[in-house]
Every structure is written in C-alpha cells, then in structure tokens.
Image (cartoon, grey):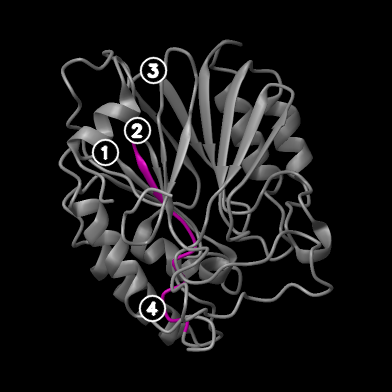
Amino acid sequence: MKIDRRDFLTLAGLGGVVVVSGFGGGSTVSASAAENDFFFVQFSDTHWGFADPAINQDSMGTLRKAVEAVNSLKVQPDFIVFTGDLSHVTDDDNERRKRLSEFRNIVSQLKLKNLRFLPGEHDAGLDEGKAYKEYFGETYYTFDHKGVHFIVLDNVSDPTSNIGEVQLKWLSADLKKRNRNSRIVVFTHRPLYELYPDWDWYTRDGSKAIDLLSNYSKVAVFHGHVHQELHRNAGHISYHAAKGLMYAFPPPGSVPKKTQIPWDAKQPYKGLGFRSVNAKSRQADYPISEYSVQGEKL
C-alpha cells in the first residue's frame, strides 16, 4: 500500500508528525496538526556503485524506486536525511567522485529540495571525507526545526572510527547552549554505543559523545551502518538503526561472520526499505513505521 494523505493523517493524528527513515522533505502539514509537529524522511546505506546480483539483482534500481516512493507522497515531509554510505567503497579517487556525483544526480529528482546528508565510512573513510565535502559540504553540523535541535555527527571520516577530540569539543560547546529539557535529535552513521564491536558496529570514542548527551532529558539518535531495524533505550537516550536500500545484514552475532544476506527471488527487496517517524516535537516522541523500497507499509 502506497503512502497517501489518508495514511499520513492516520499516522499523524491530531497534532501528529510522520518521519520516514531513509527519506525526508518539504513541509506540507495538515491544518489539524499541532503547530510544532512535522515529519521527515530518512534514507540510509544506499551504497550507490555496489554491483553483485547474488546480493541485489536491482542494484541500479532500489535508490530510484525509493525516490519515486517519496515523490508519490501527497503530503511531503519537512526534510530528507541520508545517514551515510551514500556510495559504495572504492580505492579509486576518480571512481569515488563518479559514484558520489551519480548519487547526487539521482536524489536531485526528489520533489523536496530540503535535503540533509552525512557520510558513511564507504564515502569518507579512505580520504578522510575529502571527496564527500566537495559534493555535500561539511561532515558535521547542526540545524533547528520546529523546536527540535538536530545534531549531525561524523564518526566515519577518522580512519580509526573515532569522532575525535576536535568534534567532541565542538559538540560540548553546542550542547552547553541548550537547557536540560531541550529536544535533541542526533544523526550519525555508525552507532554511538557498542552494538557489536566484533562486526565494527560501534564508535571507538562514542561513549564520550553519549556522556555529553546524557545530561539532556530528551535525546533520540537515528543511525545507519547495520542495515536493519534495531531499537535500544539507555537512560534518557533512544537509539534507532535504519534499514539500508542496497543489502541487508543478519542480526548481530547471529552468524559466525558478518556477511550480506543473499537475494531471495521469492522475496525481492526483503530487508530493504525506509521508515516513517511520527515526530511529536513537544512530547519528544518519535513513533516509527517501516516501509518497503516501493513505499508499502510493513
């Protein structure tokens, strides 16, 4: 079932908001919605340039299908965020730029032009974000929207999988400007906490960022990297991992070695997709719904 206005209003309710993990976009909100409610879309792990039919027989099509699904929304989101691994890794600098350029051209077909990006290690890990910055600008930054303070962190450009002291000092200075009850949403690529270090599913100095964020009572972190839906609550912080749009990974520790889940012809696109987050900013509440690559609610 495609997302239409009725779906949106059902998700949003009186004063509700819808957020789609893996997409995002403009602002056309029902008149019945609360003034500070809104919705955004999040894409994650699009891995443009990946090519292995044993893993994805539609590697050139999944991102485009997701773009079409968001464009078909009768109510457009407020913004779209892409939480890293926009492109698939390559050690060829020219090929990296080619893939980033092709990715940018595809997402430029989105109706909504309010797009937010952050890198993944596939985009930035081999050149410390040099090519990424040429196409998408800074790798960490903040913005505010309808009473919510958004923080974009870069935990991939450092080849040692650290955020780094310079960025942590920047984060500390930014947070000192907020009061304890500020509504804070963080976007990262890697999980900040030690989800599964054996599979590189963590940030080495993520605990330092968590310590800074733990001083605030209403924090939600949305990330990618693990290619599956996962949720965790720890203290005042909730963590929400997103599905990818190119391939899925098995649950952490469920198999001896991390490996991409093979393509299933009987269930194409299984494990791929995006999510909607019903963002109620006043309550700092973010209910989530998951959607397939083609926009069907799961």
116 left or right of 140? left
Give the number of the mark in front: 2 or 4. Answer: 2
Q: Earlier in the sequence, mark 4 or mark 1?
A: 1
Mark 1 Cα shell of 10 Å, populated few (<14), some (14-19), many (≥20): many
Select label 1 or label 3 by which is in front: 1
| Residue closer to the observer: 154 or 87 | 87
Q: Which is more N-terminal, label 3 or label 4?
A: 4
Q: Which residues are magenta?
A: 39-50
Task: Name the residue at 51% across, 31% down.
Answer: 185
Q: Amino acid at mark 4?
A: Arg
Q: Amino acid at mark 1?
A: Pro
Tell which circle, 1 or 2, labels the residue nearer the N-terminal end: 2
In the rendered structure, find residue 42 and report the number of the disc placed on it: none
How would you rate the neighbour count of disc 2 (Cα within 10 Å): few for under 14, some for 14-19, many for 20 or more?
many
For residue 176, above or below residue 65 = above
For marks 2 and 3 on the same chain, the one whose residue lies earlier in the sequence: 2
The answer to whether mark 1 and mark 3 are in CB contact below 8 A is no
Most foreground residue, 17 or 136: 17
Evaluate if marks 1 and 2 touch, with contact meaning CB atoms under 8 Å apart: yes
Look at mark 4 in the image and give the residue it sits on: 99
- CA gap between label 2 and label 4 equals 30 Å
Query: Going 53% across and 83% down the picture, which residue do you hit?
Result: 90
Q: Residue at x 70, y 48 (%)?
A: 164
The image quarter in which residue 258 lies: bottom right
Q: Which residue is mark 3?
A: 147
Question: Along the horizontal axis of the image, is 274 left or right of 232?
Answer: left
Q: Is residue 138 above or below residue 181?
A: below
Residue that mark 2 sits on: 18
